[in-house]
Image: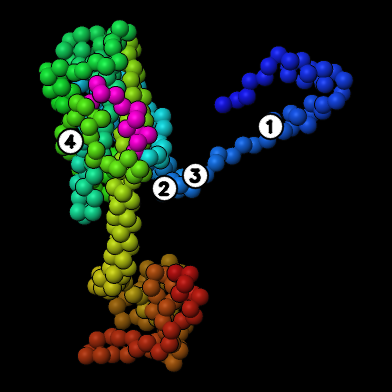
Amino acid sequence: MAEVLSQSQIDALLNAARNGEMDLASTAEKNTEKKYRKYDFYSPRKFTKDRLKMISGIFESYCRIINSWLNGFLHTNCEIEVESVEEQRYYEFSNALSEGDVLTLVDADGENLSLLDDSPVLFHFTTPLMLSMMDRLMGGSGASNPNLPASYKFTDVELHLYESIVKELVAMLGGSWGDYIDIDFKMRRIESNPTLVQVIGLDETVVIIGASVRFSNSSGRISICFPGMKLINIFAQMALTNQNLHKKSEDNSEEIMGVLKESTLEITAELGRTQLRLQDVYSLKPGDVIDLGHPVSEPIYLNIGGKEWFSGKMGTQNNNMAVKIIDTCHTQERGES
C-alpha cells in the first residue's frame, strides 16, 4: 500500500523544493525507475510465457466458437473475449467463490490423459450471467437484476437449465484444441456448493482463464480452472505426438523412394543435329540419307528433362537399337536439371 503523507510532511517537501534543498529532477528519475515483480520461490512458475500465450490463443478460438453458438441459441448478439490467462494456486481460485455459486466439473478424455491424471477441469459462470441467459432462453429480455442478492441460490429448475446450457458449452472446448491434440471434454457433474468441493489440492498449481461475456443489457464472466498436472500431461502428449509424426515422416523415406523408383521417366538419345532447307525437306524420299555430321566413333548423349545426364555408344541388343552407357555427365549439369 502506498505511504500517505501528513500535511506537515507535505509542507516540508514544498519548502525544501522552493529553497533548492531537494533536487526534483533526481526525485523524478527515482520515481520513474522500472519496477520488477518479485519472484516467489515458494511457488515457482511451471509454465513459460510461450505456454501461457498458446493457452490464450486456444481459448480465444474457444470464445469465437461459443460466441457464434450463443448468438444462435439465444437469438441475440453478445461479445466474448479472453481477459486473462494466469498461473496461480488453486486456493486463489477457490477463495473467490461463494456458497451460492455453481461449479461445473469437466473430464478431459484423450490418449493416455485420463490414465495420467483424473483431476477435473473446473468451469465457473457468474450468477447474473447464467440468470440472464436462462431468462433469454425462456423468452425474456435477459436484463440483469440490480437487486440480486450475493447469496442467491439456484432453484432445481434453474439448475436443470444451467446444466443443459453448460453441457453444450463444455462439449465445444475440444474443437479449440484440435490443432494441437485430440481431447474430448465432457461434463462430469455440477456442484451447487463449491466450498465443499475438494477435487484439487489447495496449493496445487492451476492456470485460470478468465473471459468476459457482454450482452446488450447484461454482462458476466466465465472462469476456467485447468489443473497444472493436467496441462503438463497434455503438453507432454503433444510433444510425444509431434515426435512420432517426425519419426514417421523419416521412416517413410524408403517408401517414398520406392514409389519414385516405380514411376516412368522419358529418356532421349540424341544421335546428332543438322539443318536442312525447307525445299530439301520437301523433296525427301524413302531411302534418302541425311548426314547428321556426327562421327560414328563419337559418343552420343542421353537427355533427361532436356539436360545431358549420360554419354554412351550406339549398338543393338536382341535385335533392338540400344545405347550402352559409358560415362556420367558433370555433376553440376545434373544439379541444374
Type of amino acid under label 1: Thr
Type of amino acid under label 2: Phe
Q: Mark 1 points at which residue?
A: 32
Q: Name the residue under label 2.
A: 47
Which of the marked residues, 3 or 1, is nearer the chain's N terminus? Answer: 1
Q: Where is residue 78 in the image (x, y as percent from the top left)?
A: 32, 19
Type of amino acid under label 4: Met
Marks 4 and 2: CB-CB under 8 Å?
A: no
Type of amino acid under label 3: Asp
Q: Which of marks 3 and 1 is in front?
A: 3
Q: Distance between the residues labelled 2 and 1?
A: 30 Å
Q: Position of residue 308 (x, y in %)?
A: 44, 76
Please identify the dominant SS of the magenta region. Answer: loop
Secondary element type, mark 3: loop
Which of the marked residues, 1 or 4, is nearer the chain's N terminus? Answer: 1
Residue 144 on the magenta segment: no
Secondary element type, mark 4: strand
Secondary element type, mark 2: loop
